[in-house]
Amino acid sequence: MNLQFASLLIALPLISAFFVPVIKTISRKAVMPFLVIITAVQTGIAAWVFEEVYTGGKPIIIMAGGFKPPVGINLYIGHFAALFVLIIAVAGFFMAVFSMKSIGVEPKDKYAMLFLLLMLGATGMISTGDIFNLFVFMEITAISAYALTAYNKTGEASEGAMKYIVLGGIGSSFFLVGIALIYGSLGTLNMAQIAQLAGNINPTVAQAALALLVFGLAVEAELFPLNAWAPDAYQAAPHPVTAMFSAFVVKAGLYAMVRIIYLLRDTQAFTGILRLVLILGTITVVIGELSALRQTNVKRMFAYSSIAQVGFMAVGFSLGTQAGASAGVFHMVNHAIVKALMFLAVGYVALELGGTSIEDFKGLGKKMPLTAFAITVGAISIIGIPMFNVFWSKIQLILAALKVGKTGVIALILGASLVEAVYYIRLIHTMWFESANGEKVKENFTLGVIMLLLVALIIVIGVFPNAAWNIAQKAAADLYNVSQYIKNVPLLPGVSP
Amino acid sequence: MSIGVYYFGAVSLILIGLYAVLVKKNLLKILVGLSIMETGVNLLLISIGYIAGRSAPILSEGVGPNNAVDPIPQALVLTAIVIGVATTALALTVAINLYETYKTLNIEELRRLRG
């Protein structure tokens, strides 16, 4: 099949989003099934792209309108993008199924549209090869995320969304100034060409531009000074949306940040920026874990835990070695699986029992054994117990830190795992050993199957980590090896800024 | 007039907007601050593509590629303006929702009401 069909990854959610009103006029009931079908098709396309890229070993370059870069905008679906596009599609599909049950508030057609646009934005952010196109996709993601946060129309939802909008607005302005500086000094927006010419950029300008880009993307990536929106938004957003934020929206932001930093490796600002990201990541981990410790609302606790995990990934990427990048990517994959499972389970509990405060989780093991089991597996996996997937990515992070002699990072990871153990084991204890009155709930079959699938994935990766680790290493090489990236993009000869 | 004036204006607009966002207590003023910031960024983008003495990048009689300014930043600004409008509109709808729930737009009051 023609590889240019991979552009359907962008085109399908976009056109389907605008088909939703048409579907709605035919039948209101058909909107949610339509969403499920589209996400299933998207998963199929993503699986095909993943297979093509990993067996062919070559990235797919899509040239919009047939114009060669840097004249036209190109999409670059390399190993990393192929992997994450698949994760986005699968997570989107599961959450679309969950949405059929959990979204009760009208207008559902608007929800379906925003849902598809959120997927589109994240897919685009990960696969684009043009820095301004990245900005556009980031804004698509952000605007649909703002609207989805406010979807429940309660006071908390509006407040969370407002915080997100204000911080996101500041972040996007910073990001745009960063783009302006890069364009002003290099005269190009194509990522491959930026990497090629990065040596010519004035060091001061490079430093300012990179710092602005990092701060601009830190809003989406939930790094420390700009992540104040995250707990509120996570708590107030509809449950499937929270799972999607944690599973791929954050990762898209972090990916964009890391990609831009690595592209500008030839500038003198590179090491300084890595140190900045290391510091931001460390603070993010510390604040995230300590805040999670004193939460009484489980969804909010998971939100803080999610923030802390993003800090780990940032720390992994900021080591500046290929091993660090591989560990970061591996942690991204594992965290996406685990957090999709946990937010799904928590959302399901909230749906059945009416809330997400810790009181509602008392005796959950008796009331909803399958869901409680899923949360338990997710929790012990995140803590980093051997035979579960997150253990391996934490080990790889520690090994990568050991190789560059950063003992502080090792202490950070071990200490944070200890704090995680405290609050997750407290939750597990509440679920299984505290009695509470209440009927046993009949658990939904489809959601049970999804949860068991994710649990199985956690355990399979935990017992046989090699296959997943190989994939993560290839994805990280795509991110880390910039000279190969430049070679892969067929830049039109003779076009120079 | 030298190009420096535009850069100075753009940076001051960004800083004024940032000041409003960080200091003001009224939600609407914060949103106005965000808009000012966006305007500043747009002005910065436009001035980066400006070349003294050249005309608008519209190919017509007497205007070739060599005597027009750089068209790319202008295309970027057009996109950025559209995005800015969308963000502002969404922010205002959320502000309306907040006002209907809490009957205030003062962010300190909002924080207190929520407890």
Image (cartoon, rainbow, N blue to C red):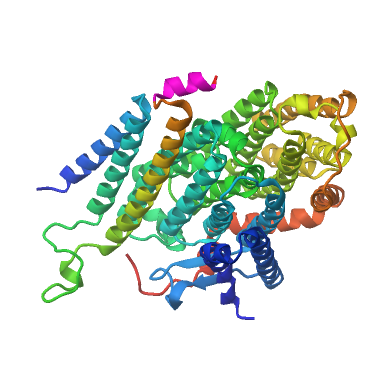
Q: Nearer the viewer, residue A168 or A2?
A: A168
Q: Which is the main secondary structure of the residues drawn in magenta? A: helix
Residue drawn at x 72%, y 49% as measured from the top left: A101
Residue drawn at x 13%, y 62% as measured from the top left: B54
The stretch of residues the image draws in magenta is B106-114
Q: Position of residue A313 (x, y in %)?
A: 63, 41
Position of residue A1 in the picture relative to residue B11 (left or right): right
Can residue A207 be seen? Answer: no
Quarter of the image with the N terminus of chain A is bottom right
Q: Position of residue A133 (x, y in %)?
A: 44, 59
Q: Nearer the viewer, residue B85 or A324?
A: B85
Q: Quadrant of residue A3?
A: bottom right
Position of residue A392 in the picture relative to residue A365 (left or right): left
The image shows residue A55, relative to residue A391, as above or below, that is below
Can residue B87 be seen? Answer: yes
**Is B15 colored magenta in this rendering?**
no
Residue drawn at x 62%, y 39% as measured from the top left: A310
Q: Nearer the viewer, residue A287 or A108?
A: A108
**Is B109 colored magenta in this rendering?**
yes
Q: Quadrant of residue A376?
A: top right
Position of residue A41 in the picture relative to residue B30 (left or right): right
Q: Position of residue A290 (x, y in %)?
A: 65, 23
Residue drawn at x 84%, y 44% as measured from the top left: A443
The image shows residue A422, relative to residue B61, as above or below, that is above
